[in-house]
Amino acid sequence: MASKEQRKAFRRGEAVEVASAEDGFVGSYYEATVVTDFPGGDYIVRYESLVKDDLSGPLREVVSGAEVRPRPPRVTAEQQFRLNDVVDAHDNDGWWVGKITGRAPNGNYYVYFDSTGDLIAYPKARLRIHLEWVAGNWICFSR
């Protein structure tokens, strides 16, 4: 999550990611769109893939500015991952931070998640290099 000094002001309609601080979801990011920006730095966001409990439509919620960051840039399809690269894996409607621990014979990458202790194989198309939003810039700590 971004510190107060790192926060960017987001406007209505802007595409963002929201970091979850809930138990069992720490280390995950969810794509959303800003619906309302409040003067104090909080936002109402509409999630792209999370739905209301009654399944009546996209989930909207108030989130703190510290939980919001721009969507990271897309990396080219030629991206190759290396052992111990920190990556985001798209699973369960969000992006989850993990580490590359190996490669399967079929070309999938094994990703270990510290937050859950799970080791799961993913195709390259469901992975991206993990980037942190620091002082208004995207930083890669993987390499």
Image (cartoon, rainbow, N blue to C red):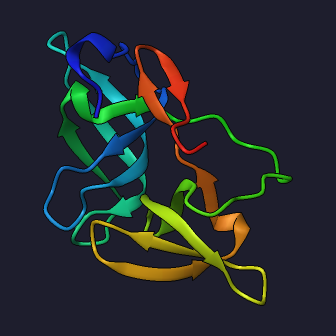
Rendering coords of residue 98 (x, y %)? 45, 62
Rendering coords of residue 118 (x, y %)? 37, 80
* Image-quadrant location for residue 96: bottom left
- The correct choice, above or below, for 108 with respect to 40 in the image is below
Can see residue 7?
yes
Residue closest to the far right = 78
Total numbered badges shown on the rendered structure? 0
Q: Quadrant of the C terminus?
A: top right
Residue 114 shown left or right of residue 139 in the figure? left
Can see residue 92?
no
Write the residue at 31% across / 71% down.
Answer: 55
Give the camera-side residue of 91 and 61: 91
- The correct choice, above or below, for 22 with respect to 62 in the image is below
Rendering coords of residue 37 (x, y %)? 28, 20
Q: In which quarter of the image is the N terminus?
A: top left
Write the residue at 27% across / 66% down.
Answer: 115
Residue closest to the far bottom = 105
Rendering coords of residue 23 (x, y %)? 13, 63
* Image-quadrant location for residue 10: top left
Residue 125 shown left or right of residue 134 in the figure? right
Give the camera-side residue of 111 and 93: 111
